[in-house]
Image (cartoon, grey):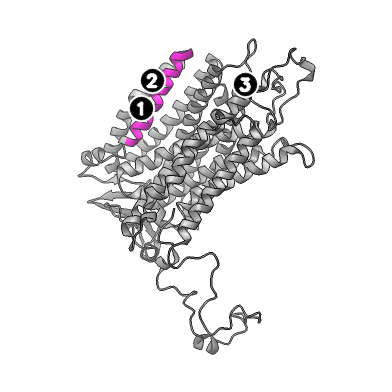
Amino acid sequence: MSSLEKYFFKRPRALQYVHAGREYRHGDAHETGNDHALLPSNTDASGETRSKSDAKSIAHPDSTTILHRTHLDLFIDLIFVGIVGNIAEHTSERLFVAPEGHEGTSADAFKAILEFTLEFLLTWRIWNYLRNFTNMFFQDDLTQRMFIIWILILALIFGNNVSYTFVNYKGASFTFSIYLIIRGSFFYIEGIYCLFIRWMWKEWLLSTITSLPATGLWIGAIFATGWAQLGLVMGALFIDYTGAIFRNSPLLDRLLSKDYRKTPDLDHYVERISSFYVIILGEGVLNLIKGSPLGEGLTAEVGSGIATLAMYFILHMLYFKSQASGEGFRAVRMSHFQGALWQLAHVLIFGALLLLDVSNLFLVTHQDASALDPPESEPTSPEKRRRLALFTRASTEEPTEEELPHYVRVGLYTSSGALAIVLFGITVITLLHSSQFYKAMKNKTLLDHPFIRAIPRVILIIIFPCLPLMGVQVGRNWLAIAVGSLSALTMLELFMAYRRCGSGVVEPAPKGDGKHNTGTRLKTLSTVSPQSRADAPESPVDTPESLRDLRHRFTA
């Protein structure tokens, strides 16, 4: 039965918390009549992770409530898919459409990327506030449902206005005001919860105090304009992000050493971060279809579109290959520094990946245009200009022939830099994970060292930003080189993983009575008698000695 169907209003509680060097979870042990049973989680204060078999024996808070939280997470993601798409569309206009009255310049491109970065960081903070709330306190009662819909309404308004943040004074004031209301709502609801969770008030008070300087800068940004406004926003975001790191630092642990302290569900946290990665990656895939940018039939743009899709697929593979099992979560659990670095790497990946989505689409739709094309002797007349397929606004037009080389250069440099940052972030995450596996490995070789295995990635990270300087001046050529390099990197890493003992290209036939894979029809469980099933020998392939045998010892 759902918590909402049993209680309209439930007493607030922290789903996970630390006390006396031990992490606990609240469980609803209804069969014993105890609604406040304390259950140790699968992570202790030292960051060591128990095996999955032990974790299964640990009761989790009401499985129905957790299932509802998963469904709610999917709905929340729908809102942010729209916000991210809106930011991407307006970033495209700022990057690849000249302002009225003059031609586009490098300064305009830099300002567009800076504004995009600030808008994205604002969106990420809102998503992270909501993710943190459902992670810490979700009880699936009417009060929380009403609060969440309140936040989603504000997020809807924010998402529709975030693209006007740096267009005019009114747009900036409205966007920052909505952000402050969202931010204040989370502090307010936690303050209300402190009336029921008494041990949480000290942590809440410290969090509120550390957020006051950023609040002052946000209020100042509402009334400022121009570069002064940009400076205030950058300062406020810096304090917001560093404050979040401080609130999870060992220093705050020492200040609260004699008290309880709430802590996140790291499994849910990693799952939500991975979901946001898919959201950003999916925006790039969506842009390849929305508005039919590849044209009608098998056009030349289809080939570039396929190459771009392959790039996103490889980036998806490289990211999730580093977190292919539960062992991949160790990077978040090991120390405060590693956890903060893991989070920072993800913020870099998300922002750069969204920028890569935007610039890649421009290169696909202008795959034959060169950054070195000489300008036409006479400018193209307005009637010959057509709307870009990647935009939906009627006011957005195709660059003229004399404008096109500049925008191709912008697209090439933006895609090159963004791809390098994405690969850099994924490499940092991989090193954080693989360094733990390397310490536990036996019979190590030089090629097993994580830094040695990261050398090919580092080479590509250096090469990608230099591609436009190395004579790659056409979008089609850039896409071919980028996808080819990533494909070669993936195959090399797979080869380095398969070379270890027990790995191979083709899975061998299972050991047994030799009747497997002979072309004869295998009997199903429904046709085998219970006695025959009991007498049948167990295959070592089907019944591993331990759960750890199911996992590869090392993940690149």
Q: Amino acid at mark 1?
A: Ile
Q: CA distance from mark 2 to mark 1?
A: 9 Å
- In the rendered view, tell whether residue 170 sits above or below residue 246: above
Q: Amino acid at mark 3?
A: His
Q: Which residues are magenta?
A: 223-245
The residue where tag 1 is placed is 239
Q: What numbered label is drawn on residue 217?
A: 2
Mark with earlier residue (2, 1): 2
Asked if residue 517 shows in the view, the reply is yes
Q: Is residue 243 magenta?
A: yes
Viewer-proximal residue among 143 and 377: 377
Quarter-wise, where is residue 393 in the image?
top right
Contact? badges 2 and 1 (CB < 8 Å): yes
Q: Residue at x 66, y 82 (%)?
A: 520
Q: CA distance from mark 3 to mark 1?
A: 36 Å
The residue where tag 3 is placed is 406
Numbered disc in front, either 2 or 1: 1
Secondary structure mainly formed by the magenta segment = helix
Quarter-wise, where is residue 187 in the image?
top left
Q: Residue at x 51, y 86 (%)?
A: 536
Q: Is residue 205 left or right of residue 294?
A: left
Q: Position of residue 357 (x, y in %)?
A: 59, 35
Q: Position of residue 244 (x, y in %)?
A: 35, 35
- In the rendered view, tell whether residue 472 sits above or below residue 425: above
Mark with earlier residue (3, 1): 1
Q: Is residue 438 left or right of residue 64?
A: left
Q: Secondary structure at mark 1?
A: helix
Q: Position of residue 538 (x, y in %)?
A: 48, 81
